[in-house]
Structure formats: C-alpha cells, structure tokens
Amino acid sequence: MPETSPARDAALFALARWGEGMGRAESLMEDASVRHNLDVRDRALAMELFYGVVRNLTSLDYVISRYAVAPQKGIAPRIKDILRLAVYQMTRLDRVPARAAVYEAVEQAKGEGMGASRFVNGVLRTILREPDRAAIPPDDLGLLYSFPGWLVKRWVARYGFDEAGSLMRASNSVPPLTLRANTLKTSRDALCTLLTDAGLKATPAIYSPDGLAIEGSPPVRGLPGYTDGLFAVQDEAAQLVSLLLNPRPGGLILDACAAPGGKTSHIQAISNGGAHVVAMDIGLDKLGLLKENITRLKTGGVYMLQADASGPMPLKGGFDGIMLDAPCSATGVIRRRPEIKYNRREADIQRLSRLQGRMLRNVAGLIKPGGALVYAVCSTEPEEGELVVESFIKSGKGFIVDDPGPLLPVAAKKLVTGGGFVRTYPHRHGMDGFFAARMVKV
C-alpha cells in the first residue's frame, strides 16, 4: 500500500462510513481519529477535511462533474470521496498546496487499482490546468452553499437573498468549542485561567455569564478540568435557555427532554444545587448519556425517569418549573451537525411542529399556578417556534408569555424579540440558532 497522510486517511475513512449511514458525523470523525492514532495537528487537519467535504458536498460534486468524463453515478464511492477531499483542498484551502492534494489523492487511489489512480490524476490535473471551469454561479445559493432547495426557498422568502446567503455561509462555518463553567465547582474566571495556563486560548462568551469559547478543536476529554467536572460543553445559545427558567433552591423542576444533560446540570447550577430536578427522556441510551454527564459534573438532586413527553405522563402535578427542549428540525445547529442539510425534508417541519405542540400540552398540566414553562428548540423555523407557542397560548391552558428580559444578562437583552421570545442566529450573533419562550401559569 502507498504511504499516505494519516490525516487524509482518517478523513477518507470517516467519509466512507458517513456515506454508508453508519452514524453522526461527530462520532464518526472521533472514531477515525482514534483508529488512525492522530496527534493534535493531524486531528485538526482531518477534522477540517472531513467536515469541509460534508459541509460542501453538493458544491464539490458539481465541480467534479465539470471535469470527470464518466457520469458521477458510475464513479465508485471510495474514488468519489478521494476526489471530494482533493477538490476541497484545491478550491477551499489556501494553506494546502494544490499539487500536494493531487499527489495524496493519487496515492490513496492506487489502493483501488491503476485505472482508478489514473482517473483521479486526470480529473485533478485538469482542474489545475483549467480552474475557471470550477466556478459556481453566484446566484445559485443551494449550489454555492450545498443547501437543499426547499430550505433555500424558505430562507430567501423570509430573510431576502443576501441575508439568506449570510445565514447559509455562517451555517457552513466552523463553530467554536464553547464551554459552560460548572459554577457548582468553579467560576468562569478560574476556569479561564486554568485553560490559559495550559496553553489554550479561552475567551469569555459575549452573552452567557458562564460561557467560554476555546480556539481550535482540542479533544474535549483531554482538556484540563474535564474529569473533575469543571465544565460542560454547551453552545452559548443553549446556556441562555436555562436562565429563563430561573430555578430556585427547593423548587421542583422537570426537564422533560433532558439528555444529554447540559440543561439539567445548568438548572442545578443556577439554583446553587438546591433544586429537585426530574430528568426525563424517552430512551435508556439517552438516560445513560445523561447519567454519565451529571455524574462527571457531580450534579446532585437529579432523579432520572424514562418516559415520553408526547404520551401519557407518569407524573403528578405540582412542578414549580418545566423545561421542554423539544425534538426539532435542528436547522439552527447545522454548523455543528452539517448532515442535517441532507437528512431533513420540508415535511419534517410540520410533522415536528405537531409533535412539539402535543408535548407542550402534555407537560403543561404538571405546573402549579405561578410556575414557569420554558419551551425551546434549536430551529430557525417559526412553525417550530413562535407558531407553536402562539397556538399553545390560544388553547386555553391558562398560560401567558412572560418577558424573559429581566432574567438575561445585559448583553443578551437585545436577543428578545418584539413578541417576548428569545431568538438567536449564527450569522447575527455568532452562536447556534435557537428559539426560546418563557410562559407562566396564571
């Protein structure tokens, strides 16, 4: 076998498994890094290549089609992945010499036979000679950013062409590694100092009082303070959601879709460890992940329950607060889970909207008068956010929308919309796209 770059081999391995539907991109890339024993530098390159291809899949296939004589459906999957990796480096990465990308691709293709390596060499060297044919029409947002036509149409209709393009571009960007200091164990300043002393660049978050952004893509489990439970990995937008619940010591709280436990642990941190939290989720696998996280974060006062928030509730009322971070289309977290672009269909929006409304109505009966119900989704779509809440309020369950502004840090107050909701976007605020509403039972 030819000697090839470990980083490129790991990226190719992960791409093959991703194309076969073997799991989520994040877990596949982590597994590939371990299998190929990558050091920090090779791991960073492998992640750049793998995620770069996944984020720009449609664009890369378009470029390949402009140069490959054979129809794309006739190209073997592994050869197509080798071409995608090379074309991504040649057209999107300035720091990788184009000829080096060609050489590595040809070496990888040799394992598939001389005919395959000659084909790869011919396509890539034609791109080197005639780069203008790789240009993508600037008015085709779906092709330019590798977004499905149905989502392009929705976003252009809602935001206009230019802002829709900005949202797609931000959704294709590399997100920061964002941590939330576990204030039951440490402070943000102390955690920042610990990470900085270890040679990492940590920057306080703009909106969240406990958030830190870490430069680069270091392995989370290797960070100082991980095993001691000093932090949780949680985007800044998700950190703001728990603040809306305002849990108090002694309060009885339900986290209705709790896994993997980021909000559960945050709820306890906000209450200074004094709340009683029922952490509920539908599957034992999810509860296992939740248990792992709250154990590492040393979060006490949490009681786990396997149940489905969309079905009959095995609980009595009397809750002071309920968090419902509902299943959704996840269009607000595409930058973290790029495969969402290819897995979602427009019909999913309405299907999920009905599910979210059913969950809201189910959990609403468990709240005592004066209690707070926080509904959140990591979706950009109003059918899963504003319209779900408006329909719920009109259903006569005795709830009103409560102003979240007083519960947010000063910097985050501008995230409150005219309707009294919290809305965040990657292109406007540099964090995940979230919707959150605080409702109170009167």
Image: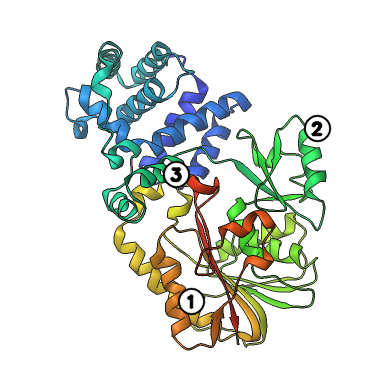
Kind of residue at badge 3: Ser
**Closer-to-camera residue (137/98):** 137
> Whole-percent x and y of residue 336?
50, 45
Q: Residue visible at 65% across and 64% down?
A: 242
One can see residue 388 in this view: yes
Kind of residue at badge 1: Met
> Whole-percent x and y of residue 90?
38, 20
Residue 296: quarter of image: bottom right
What residue is shown with label 1?
Answer: 359
**Closer-to-camera residue (79/325):** 325
**Closer-to-camera residue (258/94):** 94
One can see residue 39 in this view: no
In the depicted structure, whether residue 218 falls above or below residue 248:
above
Kind of residue at badge 2: Asp
Label 2 crowd (10 A; few <14 / some 14-19 / many >=20): few
| Residue 291, disc | none
In the depicted structure, whether residue 38 falls above or below residue 327:
above
Q: Residue visible at 77% across and 68% down?
A: 271
In the depicted structure, whether residue 338 falls above or below residue 13:
below
| Residue 171, disc | 3
Label 3 crowd (10 A; few <14 / some 14-19 / many >=20): many
Q: Check the picture and name the quadrant holding the C terminus.
A: bottom right
> Whole-percent x and y of residue 375?
54, 70
Chain-order first, disc 1 or disc 2:
2
Q: State how far apart marks 3 and 2 are (Cα).
A: 32 Å
Kindly report which numbered mark, 3 or 2, lies closer to the viewer in this rendering: 3
What residue is shown with label 2?
Answer: 197
**Closer-to-camera residue (305/422):** 422
